[in-house]
Image: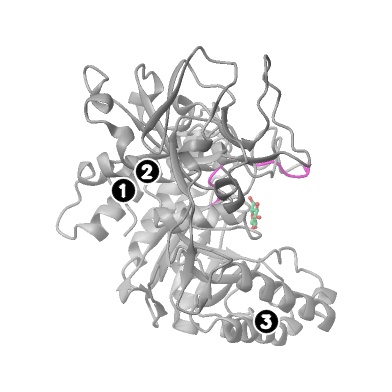
Amino acid sequence: MARRRAAAWAALGPLLWGCALALQGGMLYPRESPSRERKSLDGLWSFRADFSDTRRRGFEEQWYRRPLRESGPTLDMPVPSSFNDISQDWRLRHFVGWVWYEREVTLPERWTQDLRTRVVLRIGSAHSYAIVWVNGVNTLEHEGGYLPFEVDISSLVQVRLTAQTSVGPVSDFYTLPVGIRTVAVTESQFLINGKPFYFHGVNKHEDSDIRGKGFDWPLLVKDFNLLLWLGANAFRTSHYPYAEEVLQMCDRYGIVVIDECPAVGLVLPQHFSNTSMNHHMRVMEELVRRDKNHPAVVMWSVANEPASSLESAGYYFKMVITHTKALDPSRPVTFVTNSNYAADKGAPYVDVICVNSYYSWYHDYGHLELIQLQLGTQFENWYKTYHKPIIQSEYGAETIVGFHQDPPLMFSEEYQKALLEQYHLGLDEKRGKYVVGELIWNFADFMTNQTPQRVLGNKKGIFTRQRQPKAAAFLLRERYWKIANETRYPHSAAKSQCLENSPFT
Ligand code: BDP
């Protein structure tokens, strides 16, 4: 197959391609019209700060001549955003010097083949001195932030292209990044590529200050930087499917996902009716259809905390889980339970037992000394009944950042830490036996309805809603990196070995 694509790579952003008539004496905001099209280049760019002493290595080594990844490591950087605020790397916080942004762009064929089309590259603003290369050619320099600048790049991108296959001309192109791996479950293990995998991660929500649930690249990159900082290797999309961009990031970063459908709050008998079940199955069809090509997704969760001890829940989950397995025989299926092991009617049908418990939070307030006993009993009961691997899919404590109390009292940072420590002792007892994961509730504080249990939302985050760490985040970081290093380097527990690398094994 002879195939060439109209591709261009360019440095610095945010950028905007447009085909427009020459504008004499002004610079109009790029609006679409019957004669003008625009292509936004907002989104993820490759990025590198030049940390060399002179800050001029990029020029000396001519980083603009080749794709940036070929001259050294790159970071993902959302555009538009401030690189200082996104990263967990302290060196970037106050960095002064040249930073390099790069993006590869595929242009519509008519822009590149119709020589009457004018292609203009516009930069909304870039602080504070910008040099722009297109396909390695220096096309524009601009000094000063805040204001837009643009350049006609038609001659750099317009070439006659032909696409041909053995069966004739190609009129449509689509690229699908793929990853190949296997997932399997034994009586006591979760296997990825045949190796035991331990989930050390978080539950998330699509939520942040001001924006609420709306998708946002800078927020997403910040969250992934925090997951890396934490040493997390997994999360559950509690309690609904997340934006597809989130899963794309997981594929690229090697974060493992338990993909959950929005069946939360199935608590009344009528929720287990045939109508509800048919709808539930349709939702699973849509979810599997959308997400089945993401290697990061290793398990489907069909519900969170349903009233699974109701008699009707047995048939209901049998049907929904069997249907999901038929849709995707390659992945295990679960639902997340907070029912008692002896009463749960859905558990016989899941591949992995995912259990939530809030010892010393919603009961036995302050009695942290009970946690190990209660947790141990919980695990043993589930395991002896089902002989299936178990994930502690939620645990945690409400904590208001800045509240301190020693000895620990509920809502203080000390209480959250102490509660987590007790859980970790209990988890370590069974880790390596049949407990295959732990997911903290929650990655970050999030907004909820007001109730007497919530202080301006749910405060069980280890990060605040503004993504700053509470004391518990440091505790969890220690633990997750230790587990990551044990998994990666069986004979060493040295945290430093991994801190600059990926914990995703
Ligand atoms: C669990 C739910 C989760 C809640 C959490 C809590 O699965 O959605 O936010 O409790 O109460 O039962 O913090």
Give whichever of discs 3 and 2 has the lower sequence position: 3
Which residue does the numbered mark 3 point to in the structure image?
A: 320
Distance between the alpha carbons at the discs numbered 1 and 3: 37 Å
Q: Residue at x 42, y 55 (%)?
A: 252
Whether residue 443 appears in magenta in the rendering, the answer is yes
Distance between the alpha carbons at the discs numbered 3 and 2: 37 Å
**Figure quarter occupied by ligand 1:** bottom right
Element type at mark 3: helix
Which residue does the numbered mark 1 point to in the structure image?
A: 481
Q: Is residue 162 visible?
A: yes
Which residue does the numbered mark 2 point to in the structure image?
A: 477
**Apparent side of residue 274 relative to residue 41 in the rendered image (left or right):** right
Q: Residue at x 62, y 66 (%)?
A: 338
**What colouring method underlies this structural image?**
one colour
The reply to whether discs 2 and 1 touch (Cβ–Cβ < 8 Å) is yes
Q: Residue at x 44, y 36 (%)?
A: 10
Q: Amino acid at mark 1?
A: Trp
Q: Amino acid at mark 2?
A: Arg
Q: Which residues are magenta?
A: 440-451
- Where is residue 426 shown, x and y percent of the image? 39, 59
Give whichever of discs 1 and 3 has the lower sequence position: 3
Which of the pair 290/277 is nearer the observer? 290
Which of the pair 24/363 is nearer the observer? 24
**Apparent side of residue 22 relative to residue 134 in the rendered image (left or right):** right
